[in-house]
Image (cartoon, rainbow, N blue to C red):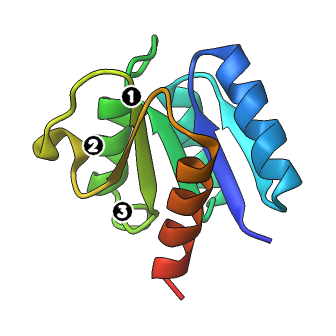
Amino acid sequence: MSKLLIVDDEVAILEALTDILSVEGYEVSTAANGAEGLDHVRKDRPDLILLDLMMPVMDGQEMLRRLKEDPELRTTPVVVMSAGRVTKAELQGSRFLAKPFELDDLLDTVAAELNKGH
């Protein structure tokens, strides 16, 4: 079972994505900001991170930068989720999913990213 970490400050999004992805057979954990997300990644090493960019405390951009700087964490796949415009530089090699997204797009993107490493 693949472990996913969803990092988003919107409770409704965390709950909806957790429900959807759990039904699909993924083990899902959540964090409300980048600082919580980094702590979780260091402890639990998810197979994939779904990361919102706009959050309080530590935004997704900073979390992504810190992940890429850490030799042990830099290969963890990340899917950036945002309703705003995002540049290639901001994505730092991560996949992008524009909010609001279709359920099929979410599931296809998660499956594609998880299958890359296998």
Residue at the top extreme of this rendering: 56
Q: Earlier in the sequence, mark 1 or mark 2?
A: 2
Q: Residue at x 21, y 51 (%)?
A: 92
Q: Residue at x 14, y 46 (%)?
A: 88
Q: What's the mark number on residue 74? A: 3
Q: What's the mark number on residue 1? A: none
Q: Residues within 10 Å of mark 1 (few under 14, many from 20)?
A: some
Q: Is residue 6 left or right of residue 24?
A: left
Q: Name the residue that disc number 1 marks.
A: 82
Measuring from the top left, give residue 46's x and y in whole percent. Answer: 63, 59
Residue 74 vertical position relative to residue 115 in the rendered view, above or below: above
Measuring from the top left, give residue 45's x and y in whole percent. Answer: 62, 61
Q: Residue at x 78, y 43 (%)?
A: 20
Residue 10 vertical position relative to residue 21 in the rendered view, above or below: above
Q: Residue at x 24, y 45 (%)?
A: 91
Q: Name the residue that disc number 2 marks.
A: 65
Q: Mark 1 and mark 2: span between their CA atoms?
A: 16 Å
Is label 2 in a helix, a strand or a loop? helix
Measuring from the top left, give residue 18's x and y in whole percent. Answer: 77, 38
Q: Mark 2 and mark 3: span between their CA atoms?
A: 9 Å
Q: Point out the image quarter for the N terminus.
A: bottom right
Looking at numbered disc 2 in the image, what kind of residue is underneath it?
Arg
